[in-house]
Every structure is written in C-alpha cells, then in structure tokens.
Amino acid sequence: MKDSSPTKSKASKQNGGRSDWSVFRTVVIAVGIIVIGFGTYFLVTGTAGLPESSPDAVNPTLESQYRFFAAMMIGVGAAFVTIAVKFQWSNMLWLVCLMIFAGGIGRVLSWAFSGTPHFTLIILMVIELAFPAALLVWHAYIVKTGEIRRQYTQER
C-alpha cells in the first residue's frame, strides 16, 4: 500500500486531511501507551496481576513465560508509538495490528480448549479482535480520501 502521510500532501493539508491524520496519529499513540501500561503492569506483577490468580500457586515456568510475553507487549506498544511519530513507517501498522489480532485469536483458542476465562479477559479478547481491524479500515479510509483529494485538486 502506498504511504501517504500528512507531510507529503499539500492538497491534503488544505482540505482537512491534516486533521484526519492528526486524530489518527493521536489514537495510535494512545493505544501504544495503553499497551505499554498493561505490559509494564504484567511485567512487574507477573501472573499475580491476573484476575482470579492465586499468589500461593506460582509455577516458575508459567511465570517466566508470562513475564516474557508482558515484555513483548511493551514492545508492541512502543511500535504503535513509533509508527505514529515516524509516520513514513505507517505500513508497519498492519503488521503490529496483525500481532494484536493474533493475540486475540490466541485468547479464543484458550477459551475453546481450556474453558471460560475471567470476564475482563473476554473483554480484552473482543477488543483485540475488533480494534486492529477498525484501526486498519480507518487508516485505509484516510489514505484513500487523501488520494481522492489530491486528484480532485489536480483536476481543478
């Protein structure tokens, strides 16, 4: 997909495309900060930070793996922030959203094979499955409307 960031189009700036990108980038940064926050919380608390967890029954292998993935969450959040700040990397947004979506699929598989998780994890699963798709549709919409604006401005 062709990258059309707000810095590349004068027509986009003149016709309101700049505000589309500003709002979008702000949302991407906010998502990144939220993901970093959750990752940091789980990195520090480990499995004890999960709802319905028992601090007495700690499995060192599970704890190690869980904290490792919490650190990966921090990396995914940092990727969102970096993409929003350095927007010529916006095509990487698709990869990062795919990672979040794949995590949601992992929660679906866990639910199917291991039973119903705590309701907060079900809410996270729904967000992980719906939000990346919505963000990518929004990104594609902004890119397409920017292209249409440029074509319309050139034809005038």
Image (tube, rainbow, N blue to C red):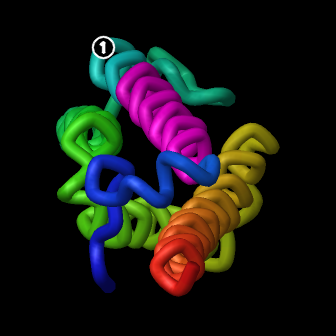
Q: Please indicate whether residue 117 sits to the left or right of residue 54 in the image.
A: right
Residue 153 placement (x, y as % from top left) = 53, 73
Q: Where is residue 59 in the image (x, y as percent from the top left)?
A: 30, 36
Q: Splitting the image into 4 quarters, where does residue 104 fall?
A: bottom right
In the rendered structure, the answer to whether residue 68 lies left or right of residue 132 reads left
Residue 64 highlighted magenta (yes or no): no
Q: Quadrant of the N terminus?
A: bottom left
- In the foreground, 89 or 72: 89
Judging depth in this view, the residue of 26 and 109 nearest the camera is 26
Picture layout, residue 121 above or below residue 144: above
Q: Which amino acid does label 1 sit on?
A: Val
The residue sitting at 51% across, 28% down in the picture is 30
- The mark tally for this picture is 1
For mark 1, what is the residue? 44
Residue 109 percent coordinates (x, y): 56, 76
Q: Is the magenta stretch mostly helix, strand or loop?
A: helix
What are the residue bounds of the magenta stretch?
A: 17-38
Give the residue drawn at x 64%, y 58%.
Answer: 131
- At a point 38% along the width and 54% down the height, the residue shown is 10
**Residue 12 can be seen, yes or no:** yes
Above or below residue 77? Residue 150 is below
Is any part of residue 47 visible from this angle?
A: no
